[in-house]
């Protein structure tokens, strides 16, 4: 039986629309094949590792807030303080 290797292209996503420990700006960088998987990974990490349970509304915001980073630019500013 021949083993077929499927290459998975990972992309970089940022998200600044989740609930953190305090009422301050938050940001996460996630590597995943697509935005849906990135959102799932972030929600799981927030719950299991950080102890931050997101409401259904928060989860919807996370899914809508995934932004793919154009890695050809070299630099992406997540928060520059200009709100």
Image (spheres, rainbow, N blue to C red):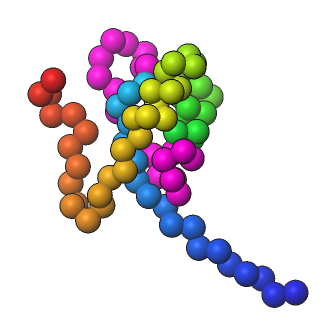
- In which image quadrant can residue 65 be found? top left
Q: Nearer the viewer, residue 49 or 59?
A: 59
Q: Is residue 16 above or below residue 5?
A: above
Answer yes or no: is residue 61 visible: yes
Please tell me how many numbered marks the rendered image carries. 0
Task: Give the magenta range.
Answer: 19-38
Quarter of the rendering occupied by the N terminus: bottom right
Tell me if 24 is positioned left or right of 79 in this view: right
Q: Residue 62: horizontal and vertical position, in percent? A: 46, 31
Left or right: 65 in relation to 78: right
Question: Residue 76 location in percent, x, y?
Answer: 23, 49
Q: Residue furthest left?
A: 82
Left or right of 44 in this view: 9: left
* Residue at x 21%, y 61% (from the top left corner): 73
Q: Residue at x 56, y 32 (%)?
A: 43
**Left or right of residue 41, residue 66 in this image:** left
Rendering quarter of residue 78: top left
Relative to residue 43, is residue 35 depicted above or below?
Answer: below
Residue 78 colored magenta? Answer: no
Q: Residue at x 35, y 31 (%)?
A: 16
């Amino acid at each position: 039986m021949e083993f077929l290797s499927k290459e998975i292209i990972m992309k970089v996503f940022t998200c600044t629309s989740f609930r953190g420990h305090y009422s301050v700006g938050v940001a996460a960088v996630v590597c995943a094949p697509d935005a849906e998987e990135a959102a799932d990974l972030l929600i799981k990490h927030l719950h299991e590792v950080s102890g931050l349970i997101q409401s259904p509304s928060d989860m919807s915001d996370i899914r809508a807030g995934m932004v793919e980073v154009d890695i050809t630019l070299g630099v992406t500013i997540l928060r520059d303080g200009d709100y």
